Image (spheres, rainbow, N blue to C red):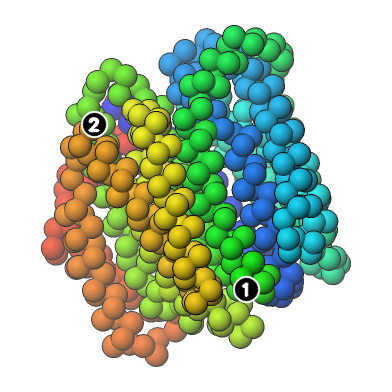
Amino acid sequence: MARKHLIMKNMSFLVGAQIFNIVGRLLFSILLARYLGVADLGKIFFALSFVELFNIITDFGLGVIVTREAAAAREQGPKYLSNTIVIKLILSLISALLIILAVNLIPRTNHIRPLVYILLPAIFFNSGYAAFSYIFRAYEDMKQESMISLFTNFLYITFGLAAIYFKLNVFSIALITTVCAFCGFSAAALIYSTKYQSIELKFEWGFALKLIKMAFPVGIGAIFFMACSKIDVMILSYFKGVKAVGLYAAAYKLMSIFLFAPYVLATSMFPAMSQWHKEEKLESLRSLLEKSLKMMMIIIIPFAVFISLKSSVIISIIYGNQFLESVPVLAILPWYLVAVFPAFIFTHILCIADTKKYAFFNLITLIVSIILNLSLIPVLSITGMAISAVGSVLVLTFLCYREVYTGLVHFAIAKSVLLSGLASLGIVGVVFVFGKLKLLPSAISSAVIYCIILYCIKGIDKQDFLFISSFIRRK
């Protein structure tokens, strides 16, 4: 139970930080979209996506490998940190050079070139911060990562509000991202050197090459995954222009802030899953998987149903009439969350058990994504892009689920999905019968009806409550 309590403790820090970040980011995103308008919002979203597409090179699977290996040998944490920082510095330089080359050679990128140059230094700062976060996770001390996240998000929102107040342009908004990345890196270095030990950059070629060799399949897979999530923006911009990107970004930003939940869960569980897999404690792994996935589905499925049904009202309230074309996207993207939640967990398990399969499945997903986007975006524009996002991540989830289920550990999830779906029919009834209710009363009524139905059909039971309480109690 002590290990479960530690997982829960780390989750509570990460969740607490993310909840505050979500509220702040959501409110700021609304203000920023209204302030910039569709065109400028499209430009900055495209520039960020362009940089992030190449930025994945700076990780190259090191996050998973360093966390896994340092968790098993914590006394070597400083050695992993120093070598990782140097490796990531080299990878950041390669990434920056590729970005400069691409933004000057790829057609139709002239409008975002200055924004990309402003964002370039953030690659180095974020890369350095990530190296420290790997060690914090390996030590299962995620409080530090949470505090830094709160700090940088507070700065970002504060500076962003100031930029809006003083009516600064989109280039100033981009500069805020780089400044906050520097602050995050500085805070991580300060915390590590204060709490653990001084930072010594001792680079060992043999050790570094060993790390890169282990990380290679994960890194390739991560590149495919990031390409899958960002290349659709490039395709949309090519066929439909930055205005379409801005319309898509408005809906996507509302959904993307909720991606913290599977990230928090997977990150908190990863050290324990690594150890249980190494020690062949498959029953512990199976229990954790079943219960965590069940809780995720209980929460995300009704959320997706409600957002889909109320998408037009939400867009109108939050962004105003200039973003009404985003309504179909907001109706579809919640189902991306439903598919990606379990995918986060399954891919983390594959990073432990079979890194080659992880890379291969992400390659298949990327191919599916490109085919879907090239087929649907010219015809359906941003709606086609949303459909492609859901379809491609469903492929990844299915492939990973099948591999984990057949090759590692059997676990049940179908019943949880079915019961959550049945209980969500109550939400459909509330929305259609009481369609004139305002958004907040409608949300509360839907939640109450859903919980009642879920309990009546035994979608949640005493064992689930005992599982939750076992995390909270220290034994």
Q: Secondary structure at mark 2?
A: loop
Q: Quick one: label 1, few (<14), some, or many (20+) residues within 10 Å? A: some
Determine the residue positioned at 23% across, 65% down.
421
Type of amino acid under label 2: Leu
Query: In the drawing, does residue 53 fall left or right of residue 272?
Result: right
CA–CA distance in space, label 2 to label 1: 44 Å
Name the secondary structure under disc 1: helix
Above or below, 137 relative to 208: below
Instruction: Give the mark nearer the N terminus: 2 vs 1.
Output: 1
Task: Answer with the quarter of the image where residue 411 lies.
Answer: top left
Q: Amino acid at mark 1?
A: Lys
Q: Quadrant location of residue 60?
A: top right
Say if 37 sits above or below 75 in the image: below
Q: Quadrant of the C terminus?
A: top left
Q: Give how far across and how far down residue 77 sits, in percent.
A: 56, 15
Residue closest to the eye, 163 or 23: 163
- The residue shown at (47%, 30%) is 217
Residue where numbered disc 1 is placed: 240
Q: Position of residue 203 (x, y in %)?
A: 68, 12
Residue drawn at (53%, 74%) of the image: 378
Residue at the far left in the pictured view = 457
Image quarter of the N terminus: top left
Q: Residue at x 18, y 57 (%)?
A: 459
Of 73 and 190, the residue lying toward us: 73
Q: Is residue 141 visible?
A: no
Q: Position of residue 232 (x, y in %)?
A: 55, 60
Q: Is residue 29 left or right of residue 219?
A: right
Q: Is residue 277 above or below residue 257?
A: above
332 vs 188, left or right, is left
Q: Which residue is mark 2?
A: 408
